[in-house]
Image: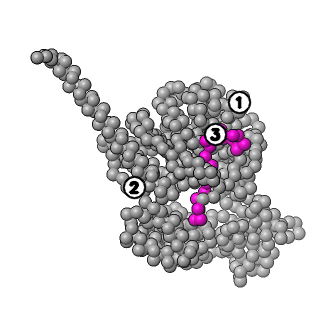
Amino acid sequence: MIRISRHNYRSLLLYAAFILLFLQCKTLAQDNAAKIGEVLSLAHKYGQFNGAALVAENGKVIYKNGFGMANMEWDIPNTTETKFRLGSITKQFTAMLTLQLVEQGKLTLDGKISDYLPDYRQDVGQKVTIHHLLTHTSGIPSYTGLPGFREDVSRNKYKVADFVKKYASRDLEFEPGAKFSYNNSGYFLLGAIIEKVTGKSYEQALKESILDPLGMKNTGYDHYDTLLPKRASGYVKGPRGYTNAPYLDMSIPYAAGSMYSTVEDLFLWDQALYTDKLLSAKSEELMFKPFMDNYAYGWVVKSAPFKFNNEPVQLITHGGGINGFNTTIVRFVGQKNLIVLLDNTSQGRYLDGISGVVAKILYQQPYELPKMSGADVLLKIINEKGVAAGITQYRELKTKQSGTHDFGVGEINRLGYQLLRTEKVKEAIEIFKLNVETYPAFNTYDSLGEAYMVSGERDMAVQNYRKSLDLNPQNTNAVEKLKRLESKPATIDPKIYDTYVGEYQMTPNLVVAVFKEGDKLMTQATGQPKLELFPESETIFLLRVVNAKVTFVRDSLRQVTGIIIHQGGRDTPGKKIK
């Protein structure tokens, strides 16, 4: 008979308990991986995800897989080695490079743009700091929001200095630090500053300071003309299927969005952020300190919509969107959990929902499996058979197949706006009315009010905006729209309208037509619905359906030579061509 001492007995018990705990953890991870696989497979089946995914739990990868095609024309599947354009996930790398230079004493967070870019316009450059650029509080207009930018500029190649001068040097929209406004110009300027301070290209600084030290061999600055093995093509999913995404010259997104990577390389990036390989602990703490609107330096920092062990769960995240691609990275630093989703079919509206379900699985929370898009189903029917048939189908499916189809308030609202964008205004009104009937909330009345505005039905627009405001007195959009809708137009001689009729060239591909309908003055931009112009004075007119004004410009002979569109703090001139 073998005798076991009390000490050895306790050791055996501890060892057995450790083995049991290890097996339980392994089983839980396997169970979570199976659930995550089911969620992503359904999302792919319903056309909501096409790309690659990676999930880590407690710092270890428990799930990774590819879904759908990296190249649909050659039937090349996505894998975990497929390279995707990252879009704005690039910003966290730009923020890291900036903070590294701060640690090296080459930049200061309160340093001004003009301290590093002396040729930048002084009135703005002496006000805006590195901190403002990092946190989207600079007040500099975002170049991607400029009228006609995507259509007329995004295909052209630019040198950094030329682009800064032409598109990232506009008048301030607000005083620096006054508010948050997401801004690609700010991160473009950070890239220019990094180049100026280091004497290296942004791409070289990125490679030498981050990618090489971390062994991120499948990550870099994307170039259209470079042969890049295993690079995914970008697609856009529309009502009639997939099409190739519009071309974009990668000098345009630059330090705000020009990187590519893989899910596995982004895991290396995530793990490095728990160490001091790239940045000191003190600087990393600053990097993840949220300022306005939960935005830190290149990251959004907020609490998850659930608790774990009765404690709030902090998440650090950022998404990206660039022609044909949508991406998201979600880090739960308290438990070293990670979710990375990279999609090459422009399905950004689904990524937050999918990552939210995956997060609930990781934290043992109740969750729902993805459902088929109700908006997509109904849009097809409306286009083929009309809005009445679509509404009939909605009522039938909602009754019989709500378990597999999503007919939530967001889906039906999205359907309404899809119809509105394609100038099916009457159909959009019927869908928004259906949403109000099912979900009588302030936001559904707000959307119905907007549709009536576009339709020119002022009284109905006012009625629905007032209902929205009754349900939510804090709805500033309704307050603003009602103010415009109920303002009394100036009284002017309608004969003046004849002098304004014509066509005005705003950009090479954008023409604004001005014409009369009875006693009304109307306008219609290329590919957009027609809108009524309401006089504020003899030369200034208000567009009630959008937050914009139009000024008609006359020469010394009182001849109308052009217009200026005032919108979003910008003045865009156009020349009369006809």
The magenta segment: 221-241
**What residue is shown with label 3?**
229
Q: What numbered label is drawn on residue 200? A: 1
Residue drawn at point x = 42 percent, y = 56 percent: 370
Give, as a three-letter code, the residue at label 3: Pro
Q: In front: mark 1 or mark 2?
A: 2
Left or right placement of residue 218 versus residue 340 in this view: right
Residue 500: image quadrant is: bottom right
**What residue is shown with label 2?**
369
Residue at the left extreme of this rendering? 1
In the figure, 113 relative to 575: above or below? above
Q: Nearer the viewer, residue 268 or 562?
A: 268
Residue at the bottom extreme of this rendering? 518
Residue drawn at point x = 23 percent, y = 25 percent: 14
Mark 2 lies on a secondary structure that is loop
Q: Are marks 3 and 2 in contact (CB under 8 Å)?
A: no
Residue 173 visible from this viewpoint: no
Q: Nearer the viewer, residue 179 or 531?
A: 531
Q: Magenta span has 233?
A: yes
Tell which circle, 3 or 2, labels the residue nearer the N-terminal end: 3
Left or right placement of residue 186 versus residue 354 in this view: right
Left or right placement of residue 170 versus residue 278 in this view: right
